Amino acid sequence: MFVSDSALDYFTGHLDILWKVPLAVGLLAVYYAVIGVSISSLTDRRIVAGAAVIGLLLVTSITAGVLVGDSEINGGSAGALVNVLAMPLYLRDVIFLGHIDLKSPLSGVEHGGLDALLVYIAVLLAGAGVLLRRYRWVER
């Protein structure tokens, strides 16, 4: 069936997932915003900042891909934690599934969800530290 009988039926039928969507979106938005703004705060040129953000995401993704290898053959690897681009996606899996997705490069790693959370927090703290150091005395 493509259409529910009423909005109330749809709402009550999806209560288990309604809180997960804003949480996952918030994790993703805060993460990428902190990375982008902290890197951008280090230069006056927008093109340099954009290239640095894209470069960071590409280099860490490629590095993680090399470290993990073919995860379907070898299983997951902790090397996937290097991937800055995919970090909030691992946490999204934990929010929605309760564990890391079986097709994820981080699957099979013991305490992979906790490790992903710790790396996520470390990246946020590093970005906040850069922003605090950069803009601490601007208003004074």
Image (cartoon, grey):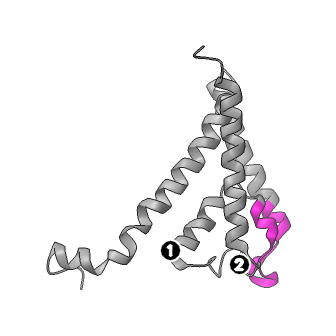
> Regarding mark 2 in the picture, which secondary structure is present there?
loop
Is 139 situated above or below 57? above
- Residue span colored magenta: 64-81
Q: Which of disc 2 and disc 1 is earlier in sequence?
A: 1
- At which x and y percent is residue 98? 56, 78
Q: From mark 1 to mark 2, how far is it between C-alphas?
A: 15 Å
For the residue pair 9 and 56, the one nearer the viewer reads as 9
Quarter of the figure that contains the C terminus? top right
The residue under label 2 is: 107
- At which x and y percent is residue 136? 65, 24
70 on left or right of 96: right
Residue sticking out furthest to the front: 140
Quarter of the image for residue 4 reads bottom left
Quarter of the figure that contains the N terminus? bottom left
Residue at 72% x, 73% y is: 112
- At which x and y percent is residue 130? 71, 34
CA neighbours of label 2 inside 10 A, class few (<14), some (14 to 19), many (20+): many
Residue 63 visible? The answer is yes
Amino acid identity at mark 1: Phe
For the residue pair 6 and 69, the one nearer the viewer reads as 6
Residue at 78% x, 50% y is: 59
- Numbered mark located on residue 96 in the image: 1
